[in-house]
Image (cartoon, helix red, strand yellow):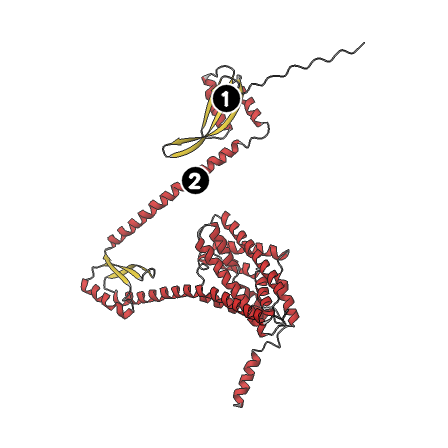
């Protein structure tokens, strides 16, 4: 019995926080300092978001880790946990306000980056942050526990970078920004939900450690306030955790189904001179799988025997389809699939080309209005060198419908005194196409002035000086 007590005391001594803990006021001051969001912290956040977005965009884990190491996001979250733990509602308000600003700036920054980035394909680093599960809850909780314990210690050293990496606050916000920029709401909600999990669990773990260390309370709440706070914390934690459990269940279900299919395939669909070369499976809305066997034809009794063994692999409730075919039939099926994809890509390419043409036309149209002051008069003088009887020059834009499409083109009006010769018209047409940088123009010739301005009478001569 004495030996048991000795080891129990030794065990408790090894995990005691009293010797390594910093003074309570020092810990609170340290956490409050991280809550502030201005000056250096604001710029560091923007730069860190850009770094994390680039890392996610190019699928670089090292770059993402670098961004997490310099992220200031954890400060306000720990501040909220501390404020709830010591009932400091002024600190809670300030922490929540600063965190909200940080979240908005982070999503806006990543949105801006992904909006202008030419790389629009989702990398594996982005995809991995769209389906948070109960394991992410555990990582955030234990990471938060480590963070607040280190924050409350005398030596706030080596574990801090590891905590920043483990809790991973920045990549989820960048994933949300990617979803907004590319109009993919599953990325936005998945990334934001992962950030919400990390925020809640880090704050919750901070509350637990602060209560465990028995920090002095900033205010003395009554029983009603204590109960209200406890119920609010419990409700938020439950709401946060439940969806992650459901997502984790779906992942586990799909993984177990895949393992059973592999066992069934390796055990029952292994035939001489034949093999499985294509297998598709899904668990929603109903478990189903398709196997394609190529090589020598398999007798129907062997296929029937394989189906009868589904119970052994717990696949009796799944829709299992076993198809046989030669290499030629498989290649034909693949060719049909590729043809369908090619047709879809051609339509997308045509639509993209149409948008590019419209954008180019808009750019060309805008260039027509980029004539500097006096340049219109310069063009008129240049026109007069070709045809001296030109007296006015103007442009306008008009729509043009051809079949089912609508385009826009530019009309040039040239006013002249008298008729313009055919040779001059040909020269004028070529000159205006080059001068206005347009691929097509409609040039109309008028023989009268577009605007007649009544000339003011000449001023009377000054009276002669009196002699």
* Apparent side of residue 430 relative to residue 282 in the rendered image (left or right): right
Q: Residue 395 got which mark? A: none
Q: Measured from the top left, where is residue 170 in percent x and y?
A: 53, 59
Q: Is residue 239 above or below residue 4?
A: above
Q: Could you say where residue 27 lies in the image, as x and y percent from the top left?
A: 63, 69
Crowd rating for badge 1 (residues with CA inside 10 Å; few <14, some 14–19, many 20+): many
Nearest to the observer: residue 423 or residue 281: 281
- Residue at the right extreme, as displayed: 467
The CA span between labels 2 and 1 is 32 Å
Farthest bottom residue in view: 1
Rendering quarter of residue 123: bottom left
Vertical side of 373 occupied by 33: above or below: below
The residue shown at (25%, 55%) is: 327
Would you name the residue on which mark 2 appears? Answer: 355
Q: Would you say the residues marked 2 and 1 are in contact, meaning their CB atoms lie under 8 Å apart? A: no
Viewer-side residue, 131 vs 364: 131
Q: How many labels, in total?
A: 2
Secondary structure found at label 1: strand
Indicate which disc residue 414 carries.
1
Image spot of residue 194 (x, y percent) = 48, 61
Quarter holding residue 378: top right
Q: Residues within 10 Å of mark 2 (few under 14, many from 20)?
A: few
Res. 162 in view: no
């Amino acid at each position: 019995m004495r030996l048991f007590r000795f080891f129990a005391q030794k065990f408790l001594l090894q995990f005691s926080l009293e010797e390594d803990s910093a003074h309570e006021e020092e810990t609170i001051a340290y956490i409050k300092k991280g809550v502030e969001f201005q000056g250096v912290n604001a710029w560091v956040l923007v730069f860190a978001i850009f770094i994390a977005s680039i890392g996610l965009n190019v699928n670089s884990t090292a770059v993402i880790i670098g961004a997490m190491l310099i992220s200031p996001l954890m400060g306000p979250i720990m501040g909220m946990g501390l404020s709830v733990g010591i009932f400091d509602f002024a600190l809670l308000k300030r922490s929540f306000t600063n965190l909200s600003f940080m979240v908005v700036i982070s999503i806006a920054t990543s949105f801006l980056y992904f909006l202008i980035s030419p790389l629009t394909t989702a990398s594996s680093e982005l995809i991995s942050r769209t389906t948070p599960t109960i394991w992410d809850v555990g990582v955030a909780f234990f990471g938060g526990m480590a963070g607040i314990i280190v924050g409350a210690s005398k030596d706030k050293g080596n574990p801090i970078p590891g905590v920043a990496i483990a809790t991973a606050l920045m990549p989820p916000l960048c994933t949300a920004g990617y979803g907004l920029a590319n109009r993919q709401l599953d990325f936005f909600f998945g990334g934001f939900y992962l950030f919400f999990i990390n925020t809640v669990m880090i704050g919750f773990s901070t509350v637990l450690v602060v209560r465990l260390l028995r920090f002095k309370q900033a205010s003395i709440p009554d029983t009603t306030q204590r109960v209200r706070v406890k119920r609010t914390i419990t409700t938020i934690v439950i709401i946060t955790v439940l969806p992650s459990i459901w997502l984790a269940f779906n992942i586990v279900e799909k993984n177990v189904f895949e393992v059973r299919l592999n066992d069934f395939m390796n055990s029952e669909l292994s035939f001489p001179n034949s093999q499985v070369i294509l297998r598709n499976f899904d668990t929603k809305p109903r478990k189903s799988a398709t196997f394609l066997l190529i090589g020598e034809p398999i007798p129907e009794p062997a296929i029937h025997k394989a189906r009868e063994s589904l119970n052994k692999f717990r696949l009796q409730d799944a829709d299992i389809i076993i198809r046989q075919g030669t290499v030629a039939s498989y290649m034909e099926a693949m060719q049909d699939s590729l043809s369908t994809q090619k047709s879809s890509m051609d339509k997308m390419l045509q639509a993209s080309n149409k948008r590019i043409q419209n954008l180019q036309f808009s750019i060309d149209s805008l260039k027509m209005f980029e004539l500097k002051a006096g340049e219109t008069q310069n063009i008129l003088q240049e026109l007069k060198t070709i045809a001296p009887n030109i007296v006015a020059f103007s442009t306008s834009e008009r729509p043009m419908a051809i079949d089912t499409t609508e385009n826009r083109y530019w009309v040039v009006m040239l006013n002249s005194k008298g008729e313009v010769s055919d040779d001059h018209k040909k020269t004028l047409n070529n000159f205006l196409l080059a001068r206005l940088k347009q691929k097509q123009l409609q040039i109309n010739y008028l023989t009268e002035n577009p605007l007649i301005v009544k000339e003011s009478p000449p001023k009377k001569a000054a009276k002669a000086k009196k002699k």
